[in-house]
């Protein structure tokens, strides 16, 4: 007999070898029905795994956060068994649960396509009807190597484990795989699932290794939950910035020009210019000076800064010309240090805030490139603020508040704030502990004093200093680092930056690195998906489409309005094509233009406009001057109402 202690402190005696499922059944039929797995002495157990010793047990039900992960992990094994039946030569890489789903990496001579997924699903349902147990077995490393001697992927994974480590495998009918667990214990518990897509994936993420086939899927406890998730995925697909970017002629990437190099098309460049103008004004009001520095830098410049040692694997190759060595600029920090150093500085001059719209280049692996989210040439508004130590908190806070303003104006939401600190055990950080301690303490104090909730991330600092990272959750449910404020005591040392203090002596400034709103490329991908391509008026490439009912009768009035709108700096176009009126109006909706103006006899006679807002069926007629005031207000207030 063994004693089982529950989370609430109650105890109960069971026969040795009792399972989590049996324990749940002994408490109530409802608990048994809703149980998924269990924690036994804080280890995750399958429903059918026997408990051999006294233990503390917490039963995981369908309402628990961990439950959906266990279900998806189990469904991954179910899918793998089905694939193995259909394609007997299949070998398997890893098959984890991921957020709201799962995947498995597969090596097989059969080219799996999305047309094959229904057939795999059908086989999965057959296995479910067989009510196959998921049986756990523990092996030594030697036993595991013998068991998987014909599987190079498993052999590699096993050899990476420590000697003496117990290895668990799971057998499910004829399918066997390495796995830690936990699982739902029997395929009968899996009911509502969908295989979603097929993609390529390098073995262990290494582009020099085998390309495997990765099948993605999702599994849920109820049909309603599955249907709801599939609807969300459909919505996300419609928001995919790669699809919208092509549809709205925002950007393109041409193989002939090179992977990861985005071309801004007229509509996209118009939006980018609007963003640049917005940032320029925002920074001017905040006291920034704007500069421009070269897209190249000497190798020695990055050796001085330390970036060569830390980032050279992500730099493009060195270019040699005469007696000099150059690299495409991966960051602008060293350039801004030189600008600061070019003059004698006084304590009265500080803070000095430099900002630049700067293009940088980084060699990202081809497998990681994705639309505008990850590219090899990126442009951003980068800033470096040179301060005295007594100005650090006030300037960090000002930079943080500027970021909040930009994120608010763009209609985005902050998910959480990170305070990224060094890990003294890792060698990638500069070794001056005194500078680190001072910098980290200052940022921590500031966040605490301002009541800014944050998550501490040890080991995620820049090599030169700690940082505050602002994380934004996108419409595609990705959490990305949108903005950053970084404290740097190191580069002023490396570049020998000084200012003359009140005492007449030389002192070392501190540098604050500030990234405002990511790169233009990544920001555009976020905004395309956030707005679903329907940009607010202040950002829309075309804000107003003028549609004369009859070009001869109403064209002159359209020309008058077009000239007036140009004078107002509105972005407007006139559609004088010989097409039906209804077609032209529908096209403005397809192009997601905020305002479509239909101009007929009534508008010409009364000097009015009749407009239809994007996404609305209602047409509104107002005097011209009232419409102009409406658009001015829409732009000035950065309204999101048409989105």
Image (cartoon, rainbow, N blue to C red):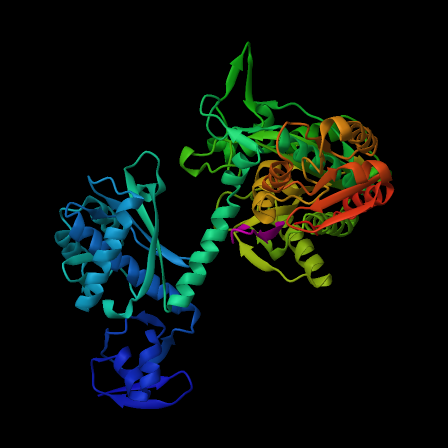
Location of residue 352 with respect to 435 vertically, above or below: above
For this orientation, the residue located farthest to the top is: 322
Give the residues in magenta.
467-479
- Which secondary structure class fits the magenta region best? strand
Location of residue 394 with respect to 50 vertically, above or below: above
Quadrant containing the N terminus is: bottom left
- The part of the image, by quadrant, that contains residue 493 is top right
Front residue (pair 596, 399): 596
Q: How many marks?
A: 0
User: Left or right of 348: which side holds 262?
Assistant: left
Q: Position of residue 26 (x, y in %)?
A: 28, 88
Whether residue 287 is visible, yes or no, is no
Q: Position of residue 113 (x, y in %)?
A: 29, 42
Q: Position of residue 591 (x, y in %)?
A: 60, 38
Q: Position of residue 325 (x, y in %)?
A: 54, 18
User: Left or right of 122: which side holds 592?
Assistant: right
User: Left or right of 187: which side holds 69?
Assistant: right
Whether residue 484 is visible, yes or no, is yes
| Residue 475 part of the magenta segment | yes
Front residue (pair 546, 362): 546
| Residue 315 part of the magenta segment | no
Location of residue 455 with respect to 84 vertically, above or below: below
User: Left or right of 119: which side holds 611?
Assistant: right
Q: What residue is at 59 percent from the left and 55 percent from the top?
A: 418
């Amino acid at each position: 007999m063994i004693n089982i202690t529950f989370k609430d402190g109650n105890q109960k005696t069971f026969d040795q070898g009792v399972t989590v499922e049996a324990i749940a059944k002994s408490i109530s039929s409802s608990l048994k029905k809703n149980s998924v797995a269990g924690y036994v002495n804080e280890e995750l157990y399958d429903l059918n795994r026997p408990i051999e010793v006294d233990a503390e047990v917490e039963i995981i039900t369908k309402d628990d956060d961990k439950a959906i992960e266990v279900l998806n992990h189990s469904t991954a094994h179910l899918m793998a068994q089905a694939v193995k039946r259909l394609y007997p030569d299949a070998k398997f890489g890893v098959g984890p649960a991921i957020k709201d789903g799962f995947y498995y990496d597969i090596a097989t001579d059969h080219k799996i396509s999305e047309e094959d997924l229904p057939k795999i699903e059908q086989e999965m349902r057959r296995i479910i009807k067989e009510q196959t147990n998921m049986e756990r077995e523990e092996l030594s490393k030697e036993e595991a190597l013998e068991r998987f001697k014909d599987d190079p992927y498993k052999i590699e994974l096993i050899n990476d484990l420590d000697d003496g480590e117990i290895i668990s495998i799971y057998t499910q009918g004829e399918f066997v795989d390495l796995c830690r667990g936990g699982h739902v214990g029997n395929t009968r518990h899996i009911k509502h699932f969908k295989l979603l897509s097929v993609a390529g994936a390098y073995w262990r993420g290494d582009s020099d290794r085998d390309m495997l086939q990765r099948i993605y899927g999702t599994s849920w406890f109820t049909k309603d939950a599955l249907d709801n998730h599939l609807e969300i995925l459909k919505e996300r697909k419609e928001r995919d910035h790669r699809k919208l970017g092509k549809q709205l002629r925002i950007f393109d990437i041409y193989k002939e020009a090179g992977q990861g190099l985005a071309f801004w098309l007229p509509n996209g460049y118009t939006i980018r210019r609007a963003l640049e103008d917005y940032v320029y004004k925002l920074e001017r009001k905040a006291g920034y000076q704007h500069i421009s520095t070269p897209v190249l830098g000497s190798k020695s410049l990055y050796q001085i800064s330390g970036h060569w040692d830390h980032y050279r694997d992500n730099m493009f190759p060195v270019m040699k010309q005469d007696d000099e060595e150059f690299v495409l600029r991966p960051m602008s920090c060293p350039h801004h240090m030189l600008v600061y150093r070019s003059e004698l500085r006084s304590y009265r001059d500080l803070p000095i805030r430099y900002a630049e719209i700067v293009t940088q280049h980084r060699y990202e692996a081809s497998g990681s490139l994705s639309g505008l989210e990850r590219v090899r040439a990126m442009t951003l508004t980068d800033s470096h603020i040179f301060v005295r130590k007594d100005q650090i908190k006030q300037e960090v806070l000002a930079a943080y508040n500027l970021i909040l303003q930009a994120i608010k104006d763009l209609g985005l939401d902050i998910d959480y704030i990170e305070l990224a600190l060094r890990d003294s055990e890792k060698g990638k950080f500069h070794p001056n502990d005194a500078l680190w301690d001072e910098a980290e303490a200052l940022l921590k104090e500031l966040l605490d004093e301002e009541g800014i909730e944050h998550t501490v991330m040890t080991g995620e600092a820049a090599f030169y200093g700690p940082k505050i990272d602002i994380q934004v959750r996108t419409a595609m449910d990705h959490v990305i680092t949108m903005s950053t404020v970084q404290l740097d005591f190191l580069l002023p040392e490396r570049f020998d930056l000084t200012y003359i203090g009140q005492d007449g002596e030389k002192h070392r400034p501190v540098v604050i690195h500030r990234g405002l709103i990511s790169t233009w490329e990544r920001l555009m991908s976020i905004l395309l998906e956030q707005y679903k391509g329907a940009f607010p008026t202040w950002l829309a490439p075309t804000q107003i489409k003028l549609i004369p009912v009859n070009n001869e009768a109403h064209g002159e009035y359209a020309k008058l309005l077009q000239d007036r709108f140009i004078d107002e700096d509105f972005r407007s176009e006139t559609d004088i094509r010989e097409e039906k009126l209804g077609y032209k109006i529908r096209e403005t909706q397809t192009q997601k233009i905020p305002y479509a103006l239909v101009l007929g006899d009534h508008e010409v006679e009364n000097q009015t406009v009749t407009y239809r807002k994007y996404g609305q069926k209602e047409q509104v007629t107002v005097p011209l001057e009232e419409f102009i005031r409406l658009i001015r207000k829409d732009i000035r207030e950065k309204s999101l109402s048409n989105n």
